Structures are given as C-alpha cells and as structure tokens.
Amino acid sequence: MSADASELDGLARAFRAIPAAMVPKMRGVVAKSAINTKKIMRADANKSKHFSALAKTINYDLKVLEFSGDAVIEAEIGPDPSVTVASKAKKPRPGPRTPGNLAGIAYYGTSRPGGGTVRNPEDAMLEEAPNFYEYAFKATEGLL
C-alpha cells in the first residue's frame, strides 16, 4: 500500500520556514514596544520633582540571538548609569553628573524616608503589553 505524502512534505517545509520569516518581523515588534516603554518611563521620571534628570538617561538596547533556526529577541529598557547630564544647580559639584546611578532610589526608595517617587518600571511594561500583543499578531498574520 502506498500513499501520496507530497502535500505533507510541503506543509513541513512551510513550517520550517516560519522562524526565518518571523525573526525580522518580531524584531520590529520588540523594537516598537521598547520605544513605547521608554517613552512611558521617561514621562514617569519627568513627573518627579527630585528625579526628573533620570528621564534623560532612560534608553533601550535590542538584542537578537539566533541559533539553528531559533531566536530570542529581547529589549533591555531603563536608566543608563554611564549617561552624564549637565547640572542645573547654582553651584554645581565638580565631576560628571550621572543620574542613572540614582535609579534604584528613584524607583524603590531607601530604608530611610525619601525616594520611591517614580513609578515602578514594571508598570510601564504592563501598560505597553496590550500594544505588544497587537503588534505581534499583526506582524505574524499570514505566516501559515
């Protein structure tokens, strides 16, 4: 008994081609959501009386790691402690001003009163999540 499996072979080839077609589309989706999350985090930091300089240091890095047809696409979004900004103080202290180093205090506070006045970055991510899902759905439509 014999069977014609040519259609199954074609379907298998189509399934194997999906990851290669999906990576560039999803890279754009992750980048767009990273930009939106960065904008939300910057707006949150700008609202703070004491930590508004932190907003200028918030940026994102996009990484695409591919191996054997599989891929991981990730964005790291947050304050960069290496970014320096000009001081607005009347008598600025010597040396570079790096407000990114104060991110932990701005977000979570300290054991003493003070800090913790900037909204948690996780909230910005959760605010952007519905948009991410929508972008991902639209980008992957028609791959099968």
Image (cartoon, rainbow, N blue to C red):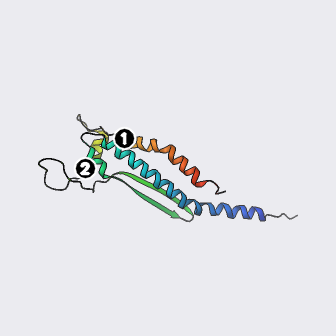
Q: Amino acid type of disc 1?
A: Asn
Which mark is on residue 19?
none
Image position of 4 with respect to 111: above or below: below
Between the C-alphas of marks 1 and 2, the distance is 17 Å
Q: Which residue appears at 78% of the width and 65% of the height?
A: 6
Q: Which residue is mark 1?
A: 120
- Percent across and percent down for residue 67 are 53, 64
- Percent across and percent down for residue 48 are 28, 40
Res. 84 image quadrant = bottom left
Q: Is residue 137 left or right of residue 54?
A: right
The tag earlier along the polypeptide, 1 or 2, is: 2
Q: Which residue appears at 13% of the width and 54% of the height?
A: 94
Image position of 21 with respect to 125: above or below: below
- Percent across and percent down for residue 5 are 79, 63
Image position of 25 with respect to 117: above or below: below
Task: Find the residue positioned furthest to the left.
Answer: 91
| SS type, badge 1 | loop
111 and 132: which is toward the camera: 132
Q: Which residue is mark 2?
A: 99
Task: Find the residue positioned furthest to the top.
Answer: 113
Locate the N terminus and report the quarter of the image it occupies: bottom right
| SS type, badge 2 | helix
Q: Is residue 81 left or right of residue 121?
A: left
Query: Counting other residues with Cα less than 10 Å from the Cα at mark 2, is it few (<14), some (14-19), or many (20 or more)?
Result: many
- Percent across and percent down for residue 103 are 29, 46
Q: Is residue 55 left or right of residue 130?
A: left
Locate the C terminus and report the quarter of the image it occupies: bottom right
Q: Amino acid type of disc 2?
A: Pro
Q: Which residue appears at 42% of the width and 48% of the height?
A: 37
Query: Counting other residues with Cα less than 10 Å from the Cα at mark 1, is it few (<14), some (14-19), or many (20 or more)?
Result: some
122 and 70: which is toward the camera: 122
